[in-house]
Amino acid sequence: MKQRVMVAVVGIPLLLLVVLVLPTAATVLLVSGIAAVGAFELLRAAGKHVHRLKMLTIVMAALMPLSCYFLGTTAMLCFAATFIYALFAVSVYAYGKDSIPFSDLTTCVMAGVIFPMFLGCIALLRADPDYGKLYVLAPFFCAFAGDSLAMFGGMFFGKHKLAPHVSPKKTVEGCVTGLIGSGVGMALWGLVAERFGGCPVDQLALIAYGIVGGAVGQLGDLSLSVIKRETGIKDYGNLLPGHGGVFDRFDSSMFIAPVYYLLFVLKFGG
């Protein structure tokens, strides 16, 4: 617990410094580094025969957020397609000699393309020219408020298991209170955004965004837990003492970020 608190005390101010004070490029670089570390963690956990693909996948994970921000989405898609072609080319070449299972190829795609794209949306939120410093905080408000109320809701009201084979401690009651917490968290984010950032908000819409984001965030948490269950690990790493690895800490916010990029920046449905 002491390590967990110390990491939070040091890490949260540093994170806020990068995303709120330094230029947008600093956030992009930070996200790129997180994506690369996350790729390493996932390959170590779920990859069985990825030794010849490991470095390529980690480099690709770092390139995804960088290419999207500095070169545009077209370049990012070109990099992603080239990477997938390369994976299959290596697979074809190695087949029958040192074959690479298809499960390992899909692990590389998740580690090198999909999850870095999700994380890259955090950088894209920050890159919004008008309210980027506010938008980038939204996934974290949603995830933190949801996780906090889910924990307390599960402790005080939890009776019915949500997904006992994936996460035995999570309950339906905790899930519901977590969704309420995410809605409240986004309402609080709206008050901060409107008062201190001059961002026009619709509180009812934000509560709905919070519930949607909370549901996606809980899916992210459970999805990454499935991988841990299948691979028999407790944490993805020990980069953050007391918190585990990158995917242990950013699983919910990583899943929420693409949804909020659609809602806030691209104005999907608005």
Image (cartoon, helix red, strand yellow):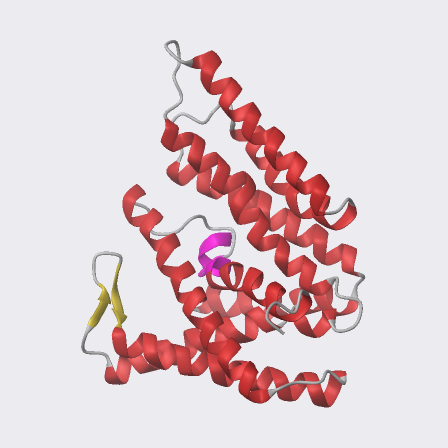
Is 156 drawn above or below residue 14 in the view shown? below
Query: Residue at the top extreme?
Result: 97
Instruction: Indicate whether 55 appears above or below 30.
Output: above
In the rendered image, residue 45, in percent from the top left (x then y), is placed at 39, 40
- The percent coordinates of residue 113 (x first, y second) are 55, 41
Q: Is residue 34 left or right of residue 94?
A: right
**Quadrant position of residue 14:** bottom right
Q: Residue at x 40, y 25 (%)?
A: 49
In percent of the image, x 62 and y 86: which residue is there?
Answer: 202
Q: Quadrant of the C terminus?
A: bottom right
Going by the image, does 106 lie left or right of 229?
right
Relative to the observer, which residue lies in front, 81 or 161?
81
- Residue found at x 39% / y 53%: 224
Relative image position of residue 115 (x, y in whole percent): 52, 48
Q: Is residue 205 above or below residue 239?
A: below
Residue range corresponding to the magenta coloring: 241-251
Q: For the point 57% across and 36% down, which residue is it? A: 58
Q: Is residue 244 left or right of residue 157?
A: right
In front here: 11 or 228?
Answer: 228
Q: Which corner quadrant holds the N terminus? A: bottom left
Query: In this orientation, does residue 145 appear?
Result: no
